[in-house]
Image (cartoon, helix red, strand yellow):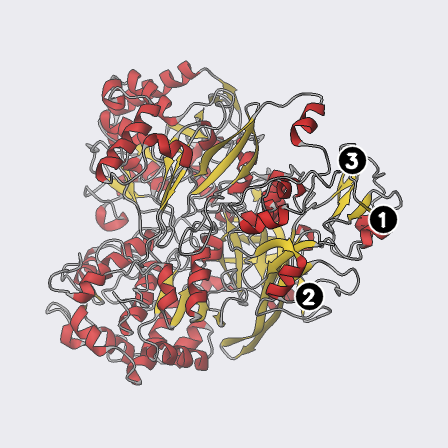
Amino acid sequence: MSNNTDKTTGATLSRRSFIKCSSAVGAAAAIASGISLPFKSKPANAAEASTPAGPEKVVWSACTVNCGSRCPLRMHVQDGEIKYVETDNTGNDVFGEDTQVRACLRGRSMRKRVYNPDRLKYPMKRTGKRGEGKFERISWEQAYDEIADTMKRLIKDYGNDSIYLNYGTGTLGGTVTKSWPPHNTLIARLMSLCGGYLNHYGDYSTAQIAKGLSYTYGGWAHNNSFSDLANTKLNIQFGNNPAETRMSGGGLVHHYVASKNLSKARTIIIDPRYTDTAAGREDQWIPIRPSTDAALVAGLAYVMITEDLVDQAFLDKYCVGYDEKTLPASAPANSDYKSYILGKGEDGIAKTPEWASKITTIPVDVIVKLAREMGTNRPCAIHQGWGLQRTANGEMACRAVAMLALLTGSVGVSGGSTGARESDINIPFVRFPTVDNPVSTSISMFLWTDAIYRHQEMTDKTDGVRGAERLSNPIKMIWNYAGNCLINQHADINRTHDILQDDQACEMIVVIDNHMTASAKYADIILPDLTTSEQDDWAMDGKASNAPYFIFAQQAIEPQFEAKGIYEVCSELAKRMGVEDEFTEGRSQAEWVEHLYAETRKQDPSLPSFEEMKELGIYKRQYQRDFIAYEDFRKDPEANPLNTPSGKIEIYSEALAEIAATWELDDDEVIHPLPIYVDVFEGHNDPLTAKYPLQLTGFHFKSRCHSTYGNVAELKAAARQELWINPIDAAERGIKHGDMVSIFNDRGEVHITAQVTPRILPRVVALGEGAWYAPDGQKVDHGGSINVLTTQRPSPLAKGNPQHTNLVQVKAIKKA
Amino acid sequence: MKQLGFYIDSSKCTGCKTCQLACKDYRDLDVKRSYRRIYEYTGGGFVQDGDTWIQNDVFAYYLSIACNHCTHPACVQACPSGAMHKRDDNGLVLVDEDICIGCQHCANACPYGAPQFDKTRGIMTKCDGCIQRLSEGKQPMCVESCPLRALEFGDMSELREKYGLTADVAPLPPSSQTLPNIVIKLNKNSKPTGDTTGFLVNPKEV
């Protein structure tokens, strides 16, 4: 049947009731002119409801989690409750003019995070063993007093360096609420005013590339913005996957696709998985065995060198150590890169495509063709993701990938690249002022578990301790703010569990968060934090190519339950520690929010006023230029040297040669002045493959940002946590699509359903990182948490997390 | 008569499901109901050659499908109560919730899985093209949400003029069955309706 009435509301439709609509969006207006509502009018309809609803207000808020983007959320609030969420819907959304910053599926599900049954409601104190999740409710006063008293005692008995700030990026995008890097947090401000804290360096996202590529380029390595893909001839995404790691439309995947579509550049994706970035938007997918990226690069270099396809003039002028001409005086003969590739170096092995093929599993002809394509399309765009560096020797793998940009002379020019991950243009914004940490000692963020029980062994040469030769105290207290690295996101959950069981070792763990995460279950004291929806803050640092923005995230609803914001919490603790005035400088959170913006506007008076920002919510800029990394250096390397010791791009690093000679390493760990390929522990050549024949890699999964949003039922159902396994491996194990499988190694066991898919290389399996750890009584995880299987053994140089280097076995346990 | 419908750019769609979740949030749907569903169609494979793996046309693509507000809606034909109806003025297929008896014949009849049963209220629900928003001059929530700008909504005659007539692609049924009011821009990997070289990867998600 068809008719013109809709009895949904019992009202008869009138064709005269055309709604006069906004002409802001032409297409929508055109549609609306033909639409009549299936009821009389909105107010009349509302009045018929049994409980009259109050007026709706729309508040600009934000999603400030650690995905790389920061998304505006427009909260539709009625009667004090968020009813639904919209995102940036301002302007015309013409790409390159006024691109909207559109939130992804997670931001759109923020309501389910704010009103989640897992919300922490009031301060709690542990009553059972760590991890059991048994707590009693306490008052805020008691919580503050116990924390302050314990801190005073530990500082007196051990020293400030016994108090550690754990890694946490749950509110990375905030300003007042910023949870990382440690020195930018309010916890650090509090601790520094109280004598300091044990700091950490590195991060779970980029430990190896941040360290590794700093030797090549000096400091954090930049690359051209995605907008520059519009100018390139060849687009190579080496393990880079913006569709799954930079999902929001104000973030990078939209910029990636739209910019690439402008140049129609041939696109090659190198990845063990056929990613969503590929999925029909690529010209070629080259699947590669995990942790063998440096071998592929060496094979490509061999072809380019022997076929005279390298940019020799660039290598001579801008680089150190490509060949003997630019090798430093301290370097031995034949220790240059070209000699290494051609087999004239210390190993005497020519890195032929045949050699590389055996290691990477990539056919020889694919390697040769790729090398020729790169060598004949100079300069070209080469962006690497952060997955390939999150491995057992990721420091060298990421340096190796950068070689492709150097061999092709692509650095510092439009259409080119550096081989690092893409960079962006930012709008400078004044941060919450920091206080210098009186404690200089810093450990790798990955080694805090070790620093609890074997601090006396940890030195600069053995464990990468910085700022001091050795650790003089164990970690006795941990601040864990807006982070899940106490358990869920740190490697080897079962080992961490055991270390944390001794509550006389690390005596006090304070977790400040929104939800009862796996980490919160290991807290001694839990403090319930406000969500972004319940307070004012600035959200910035969203990666957005050449279209940067910041957001004034404003309070949409009242604080839920007894939750309090980090500023109030730290202020109360500062009072008890006798540093309240220094901590607050006499300002409330609201006053800080206004003050920081006033300071920012002093630097850039063209920004809207504070009052205007309340209305605007988001401030965006569209630059009509691209970010070209090291452009000045390329134009004039003498006048604009890099921050490397030589001022040039260092293919051969004397600094690394020195470290390689002095650090204490195990036999299967290599630090090398050149970006060479080495087999890694738990790689495809490890004897352990006899027992655990499958390489397990993690990946960023759309239903979560790391572990954030991992408890939202709607997201869990929309994108199910499954193990990716190739049909060949599945068939050998009698596993069918949808079967329940066990993934296991000596560290633990996970039960999850199998997704049998050709989108992954055989002999490799993949599990999205961040799923919430859900152990049964027998230590088997049923949530699909990859860190039950990952190792706490750090990478050699950065002492970083090799969470994509794991060997496992998989078996079927239950048919679908 | 005007006929409204969706344009779906499968060449841009990354399967992120923002459209689905934005809709669920706006329409306050429970976990099990999705007015918009995203199909992943995948195929191809590997052959071992010595130490190497040769990948043979491994492919994947996504399709975001809501209600297609069909010209010959199977749901309307199957509905015994007359609750499911197609509007004359804009072609949207809607449920009259006062009439619906919750028999779910429409859900069984629809080859696209559009009708979504509301267990709590015992009635059928589905995508209504965000008719309330349309009346306010806005686009449907899913369209405005898409991070890749892969969705559009409008008069089908205009969408077809702009983007062509394609409405057939695996794993969708032949468009001749119900004459869906959608235009699809095919992904490079697209396979024709009836293709058997690939498979629906995520039946539990759609």
Q: Amino acid at mark 3?
A: Thr
Q: Nearer the viewer, residue A40 or B147?
A: A40
On the image, the x and y values in percent for residue A384 come to 37, 62
- The percent position of residue A426, horizontal first and vertical second, equals 31, 48
Chain on which label 1 sits: A
State the quadrant of the C terminus of chain A.
Answer: bottom right
The x and y percentages for residue B194 are 73, 69
Foreground tag (2 vs 1): 1
**What is the C-alpha distance between the residues marked 2 and 1?**
30 Å
Vertical position of residue A776 compared to residue B106: above or below: above
Q: Which tag, 1 or 3, sits closer to the chain's start?
A: 1
Kindly identify the amino acid type of the residue bearing the numbered disc 2: Ala
The single residue placed furthest to the right in the displayed view is B80
Q: Dot 3 corresponds to which residue?
A: A12
Quadrant of the rendered image containing residue A10: top right
- Name of the residue lying farthest toward the bottom: A307
Marks 1/3: CA–CA distance:
17 Å
Vertical comparison of B150 with A89: above or below: below
Amino acid at circle 1: Met
Instruction: Tell me the SS state at disc 3.
Output: loop
Closer-to-camera residue (A798/A322):
A322
Label 1: few (<14), some (14–19) or many (≥20) C-alpha neighbours in 10 Å: few
Task: State how far apart marks 3 and 2 are (Cα).
Answer: 41 Å
Can the viewer see residue A477? no
- Chain of the residue under label 2: B
Disc 1 marks which residue? A1
User: Do the residues bearing badges 3 and 2 touch, measured as CB atoms within 8 Å?
Assistant: no
The subunit letter for the residue under badge 3 reads A
Q: Residue at x 32, y 18 (%)?
A: A149
Give me the residue at 28% from left, 75% from top: A347
Q: Tell me the residue that label 2 is attached to.
A: B170
